[in-house]
Image (tube, rainbow, N blue to C red):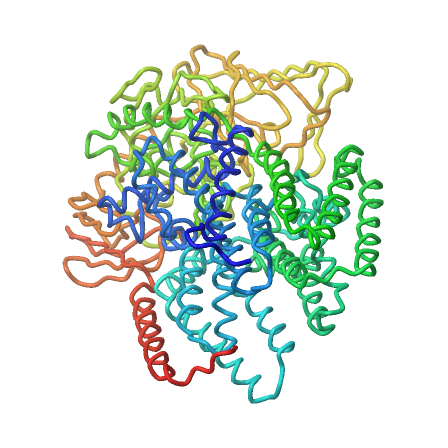
Amino acid sequence: MKKQRGALAPWLITSLIVAMMYFVLSWRAGTNQLVGGSILSGDLSQQYLSFFQYYRHVLFGGFDQMGYSLSNGMGGLMAGNWAYYLLSPFNLITLIFPATHLPEALYVLIWLKISLAGGAMTWLLQKWLPKLHTSYAVALGITYGLMSFILNYQSNLMWLDGIVLLPIVMWAMLQLLRGKSWVPYTLILTLVMICNYYMGYMIAAFLVLYFILYSIDEFRDWPDFVARGLRFAGASLLSGLMSAVVLVPLVLDITANKSNIHTSMSDMVHQMIRIRPLIPAQLISGQVDPRVPSIFVGTLVVIAALGYFFNRTEKLKTRLLSLALLLIFIASTLMTSLYLFWHGFQEPQSYPYRFIYLMSFWLIVLAARQLASGQWTKRQWQSIGIVLAIFLVYDIWIRHAANLSLGRLAMATVLALALAWLINASRRWPQLRYVIVALVCLEVGYGGTRALQNTHGVAGDSYRTYMKTMTDVLGKATAKTDYGRLEKTFMRGGDRGDSYTYRYQGISAFSSNNDPELADLLSYMGIPAYGYFEAYFGGTQLTDSLFGIRTIVDTTRKTNTKQDFYHYGSREDVHDWPVVAKSGAFTAYRNPNALPLGFASPKHFEMPNFSYVAMLDDQTWLLNNVSGTKRVYFDLLKPHVSYKNARINQSGQYYFLRKKNKHKAASITITYPVKKGVPVYVTVGQQFLDSATISIDGKKVNPYKEATKPTPLGVTPKHKTLKVKITMHDAVIPYKTLQANQLDQKMLKKTMTQLKRGGWQLNTLTSNHISGTITTKKNQRLLTTIPYTSGWTATVDGKPARVYRGIGRFLAVDLTPGKHTVTMRFKTPGLRIGALISLIGVALLIGIEWWLRDQYKYAK
């Protein structure tokens, strides 16, 4: 079908249809941020909004934060975050929007990428298969742009670049393999790798598999085979070289951080075994299950792809090779080794089967081949009918486990029969192909609405409301230059990245590129932290002071899930500190004992075997060793326990709180004699957080439930006794610790005063340049609370000095007695060598293209 003069290009038609459909579907599902819906859910709400605020700050002048940011938790590398989240050229669109309207900006970003993905697929199919009717190319482009993978995972907007670019890089690869220019393939693959290395890795692996398939299928002789292999390998290598400016710093970042996170495979294996029987049900429109691969690409694709394998006009070798690639994807959903291969040999913490869009892409390609051939024989239809009948019977058998109704199955059957009749009839009446397009739109529209409803978030204006409030509160709290680190007792949703948004130094952070060793240390201090996150909701006055938290913002506002606001307990233990800012229900307190970012400490001490239960003992040990003292900061309180339908017994290292009668309410009340007005920390095992309600002196506490180790809850007693009541939800609660300790404030102040006398007095503080003076009375070590990473260098009085790992986690420099000027500077590891390699790659590409300009053998 020839395009009429003045008509829109088919790929543009597809993009416009997908754009219109996504806008309407998201409107119906309540996720259209532009018309009162909300995209505030999942990692988009908990991570990406903060990262994009950081992105704005950097591009609007905060260049010192680009390589290393003191807003990244206590401080951390940023190369991995740039390479994973922020390097897409589409992201520049967000700069047009005001900071308070960032959710709207991200909705537009997702909308644009999904629309372009559909158009890119139509463009590829028309280039690759000229005989494919335009209506089919448009229909298949729509199924690609609105396939279940995209709609289920669309909030992970950094992955969408790969889905947009996959059809384009596929076409460039075909051109390369046919003897045409290296330039398009090399440049587009480079862009894929730079936009998001994670998707780039998967796409590169897919291209290698397709190259093997293509080379076997097109094999003529060994010289031609070798020449094609060298062409593909050379162009791919050039792409890697040109991406080095991003990939080299990234690899060093991952080596220092993410690669050190090790998770057990047992849970993943058990999960895969449980969901395997449910996979076929995902071929039915609207089937949404976050545990199962999102493989739905429409009934038209399923019918045509099956028809391709039974199409005898296609070479048997080609069909077998195509089937082999499809079987690799199927095996990857069943075998843990292949599953991990696609994910870079690390188990995803959420959003499983992230590679499955490649299988969907391949199914659409196979369907397009069949539709382009126009070959539909009686034997084909019989074979397709048998396979679909088997799927139907199986889905009826597992419908309860897969949450499938007979009505949905009947609708799917009717749709398949209608499409089969239309495909056959359209050979006589071509206009019926547009009915097929309409049916495809209806089917993917229904499935898309259900998928988007599954990701519906909180109120769309909650982010804007929160940001306006926090801008006022934190603006006042950080107005002075000595605010130091700042932390809060609340957050919006699960977002631990407010330090990025409001440009302050904190501890809380959430990123797949966090330092797991730092998280490990903090967790032993009783602070909820694990691998990818730190959430400062379990601190004490000791950790506040030691880690330089000079400002803590508390609130009387209660948790409001509709507004996505969560208040985790209350730091009543800091309410006797000076108030430095107040705005409505929010109050900022100034810590008089907070240490500077660096201070003089003994040069050597050995790390202990930290306790899994006595978090306050771990805090005491750490402070005593960095201060060279032997003091006690917490006094263990003796409890009096009363039981209501409950009892406690011990077995091994665990205690067990049990109901006597499982059907009646049960609780225990623990009364502690205390000093009135002196902070007390009640340390509870994480098992209580999910299995019981905790109240202290009659007030229900809402602790942060993501803790991996026991958490201290800080209160200030108003009487001479403190009552802790634990109301049981489960019949049995195993735990390792439940105790209360009272702080010795005078002893803590004595130690902190001593350390502050040897404090690092800063005159320059940016994320990549820190300088100040410090006075030591003997051979000591300047110990900072800035996490160590390669890239930092130091000078002492203008002379180079070695940077050590203090406490195994933080930047440290050895000093002799006297007054010294210590300067630390940061340069992103690998950035220079990566840039040099990229320049070499560009020069090689230009040279090769110039040398081969007259030697290309263009295929017919």
From the viewer's perspective, is 165 left or right of 452? left
Position in image of residue 111 (x %, y %): 46, 41
Quarter occupied by residue 243? bottom left
From the viewer's perspective, is 762 left or right of 735? left
Q: Nearer the viewer, residue 47 or 839?
A: 839
The image shows residue 618, relative to residue 123, as above or below, that is above
Position in image of residue 743 (x %, y %): 41, 26
Q: Residue at x 71, y 21 (%)?
A: 647
Q: Nearer the viewer, residue 737 or 198?
A: 198
Give the total of numbered labels.
Answer: 0
Position in image of residue 686 (x %, y %): 58, 32
User: Quick check: can you spot residue 228?
Assistant: yes
From the viewer's perspective, is 839 left or right of 531? left
Q: Residue at x 53, y 11 (%)?
A: 698
Quarter occupied by residue 455? top right
From the viewer's perspective, is 425 left or right of 545? right
Q: Residue at x 22, y 43 (%)?
A: 758
The image shows residue 803, relative to residue 349, as above or below, that is below
Position in image of residue 10 (x %, y %): 50, 52
Q: Nearer the viewer, residue 651 or 184?
A: 184
Q: Nearer the viewer, residue 639 or 271?
A: 271
Q: State which quarter of the image contains the N terminus.
A: bottom right
